[in-house]
Each structure stands twice: as C-alpha cells, then as structure tokens.
Image (spheres, rainbow, N blue to C red):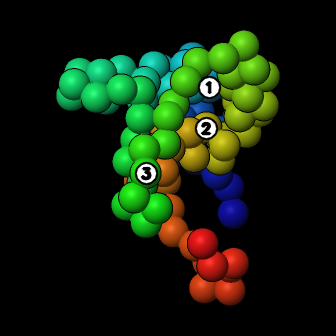
Amino acid sequence: MEIPEYVNGIPTKKTKSKERVQLINEYYSKLRKKPQKEGRSNSVFNKFLGVDVYVVEKESDKKTIYAASKNWQSTYAVKHLEDVITNATKLDDGPNL
C-alpha cells in the first residue's frame, strides 16, 4: 500500500522534513497562543486528571521539533496534541492515581 503525498495537510515523504518542521512550529505556536487568547495561562485542561497541563517553550523544544519532523506520523500527533492532552485517560490496566 502506497502512502499518499499528504495526510491531513502533512507531507509524508522523508525528504520533506523541513516542511514538517515549519508545520510543527505553527502547531506549537497555536497551542501556546490559544489559551492566552481565551484569557488563560499557557495550559490545556485534562478532563481525567482535572488539572491544567502547561505548554511551555524551552530550548529543548528544538530537539523535540526536529525529532518529530523525521516522520509524518509524529508531526500528525503534534498537530493533534491539544486533543491528546485534553482527552488523555489512564489505561484499563494502568496504575490507579
């Protein structure tokens, strides 16, 4: 099965990592700015835990961005990071909190 050239607006070819870096930077920027526009701090509320998860910018973000840009699946995950943080729950066989 051949992978399409783009999945949900994300280039899939290995040679397109520079484009994915730009997309990831945009996704992180939107994720940090959205709560501020809503009058909240840089956080996304996790329903299961009942806590704010803070999204901060650090020097290590560059390494994370370049690692995530190596394949389209990681870039896709970053694009949906807000949903992941908001809706994350414990696994059925995971430890109790």
Compared with 51, 67 (above or below) is above
Numbered badge on residue 52: none
Is residue 84 in view from this perspective? yes
Residue, x 65% and y 47% (percent of image)? 73
Residue placed furthest toward the bottom: 93
Query: In this figure, what is the number of numbered marks?
Result: 3
Percent of width and height locating residue 31: 42, 29
Disc 2 on helix, strand or loop?
A: helix
Residues under numbered marks 1 and 3 in contact, where contact means CB atoms less than 8 Å apart:
no
Residue under the point 72% across and 13% down: 59
Name which residue type carries label 1.
Arg
The location of residue 9, given as percent across then percent down, is 46, 36
* Mark 3 neighbour density, 10 Å: few (under 14) some (14–19) many (20 or more): few
- C-alpha distance separating marks 2 and 1: 7 Å
Rate crowding at label 2 as few (under 14), some (14 to 19) or many (20 or more) other CA atoms within 10 Å.
many
Circle 1 Cα neighbour tier, 10 Å, few/some/many (<14 / 14–19 / ≥20): many
Relative vertical location of residue 7 with respect to residue 96 in this rendering, above or below: above
Quadrant of the frame with the N terminus: bottom right
The residue to which callout 3 is attached is: 51
Q: Amino acid at mark 3?
A: Val
Q: Please report the residue visible at 66 percent of the width from the left and 43 percent of the height from the top.
A: 74
Q: Quadrant of residue 92?
A: bottom right
Q: Which element type, helix, strand or loop, lies under badge 3?
A: strand
| Marks 1, 3: nearer the viewer | 3
Horizontal arrangement in the rendering, residue 69 relative to residue 75 (left or right): right
Q: CA distance from mark 3 to mark 2?
A: 25 Å
Q: Amino acid at mark 2?
A: Thr
Return the mark for residue 75: 2
Q: Which one is in front, 38 or 3?
A: 38
Look at the numbered discs 2 and 1 and tell me whether their residues touch, using CB distance below 8 Å.
yes
Q: Which residue is mark 1?
A: 20
